[in-house]
Image (cartoon, rainbow, N blue to C red):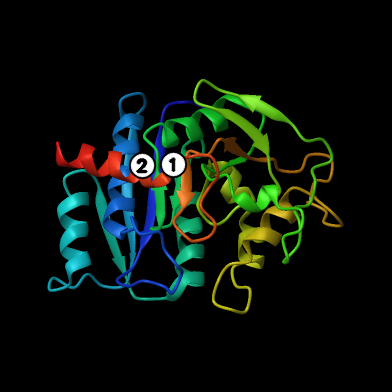
Amino acid sequence: MSENEATILYRTFNGENNAPRPNWYSKELCLKSILLSYEHLKNQIPATFTVLFDGQLNPHDEWTKELKKIVEPRGLIIESSHQGNCESTINAIYKASEQPENNTVIIAEDDYLWLAPALIGIHHSLTQLPIHYSTGYDHPVRYQPDYPKGADYPHWHNTIYITEESHWRTQESTCMTFAASARTIKEDLEYFEKYKNNGKGRPEDRELFREMQGLGSYKYRDPEHPRILVNPIPSLSTHAHLPWLAPIVDWEGQAKKIFDEILK
């Protein structure tokens, strides 16, 4: 894959879900954190930032005002009719698949906090390592064999890689904030379509990545060459959802650091 370009597709809408949040969380802070990482990325490779807004921008809404103020000097905002989580996710997947095939495409939800090296680190993982999918989020479930909804499926051969930003470990699954080449996403559209709705208004992300990697009883369409997903250790981003903050990193301290950086 060429290391020439990256595309960030940032999914958001005018609202919040009911997830329990850390006290430092705000949608504005999460957006600003990925834009700081985007500036770091752009210092090294050409990159674009596009917000995919699920709904119509309301000029009287505070999130709309903040979004336009923060994003428009740096990127593009695309509105659409409101479709909800499942349809807006698959539409982001389709848009990712339409990018130049060697582009690194990062699809991001709007409730993650990002460290400055995250996006370039993810790009390097995809362009320097023999893998297909990457995420910046080291989910704490990885370290909970007694997780009540089921422990991770082991890889047939667990591997740890290294880039200048981080160590990277093979992983069974991740949420719908992840990255791949546009070509890989296009080749795997059938799997994203299969798992776009778990019946509860969300994609079935865990089973999606398990099947593409041929884990457990799953079989990828090419059993000899399944997909490989990695995440960094320690994490380069976190889902701002309690109690699932990525381990090791002082996220409250990082949030304050990002806030202070923004104020400069």
232 or 201, nearer to the observer:
232
Instruction: Tell which residue pokes out farthest to the bottom in this image.
Output: 199
The percent coordinates of residue 27 (x first, y second) are 31, 59
Instruction: Describe residue 153's horizontal placement relative to residue 125 as left or right.
Output: right
The percent coordinates of residue 15 (x first, y second) are 32, 73
The percent coordinates of residue 3 (x first, y second) are 47, 26
Above or below 27: residue 160 = above
SS at mark 2 in the image: helix
Above or below 3: residue 149 = below
Look at the numbered discs 1 and 2 and tell me whether their residues touch, using CB distance below 8 Å.
yes
18 or 191, nearer to the observer:
18
Residue at 80% across, 46% down: 154
The image's mark for residue 253 is: 2
Q: Name the residue under label 1.
A: 250
The percent coordinates of residue 161 (x first, y second) are 66, 26
Above or below 30: residue 120 = above
Residue 98 visible in the shown view: no
Q: What residue type is labelled 2?
A: Gly
Cα separation between marks 1 and 2? 5 Å
Q: What residue type is labelled 1?
A: Asp
Residue at 47% across, 48% down: 238
Quadrant where the N terminus is found in the figure: top right
Residue at 80% across, 51% down: 215
Instruction: Describe residue 76's horizontal placement relative to residue 85 as left or right.
Output: left
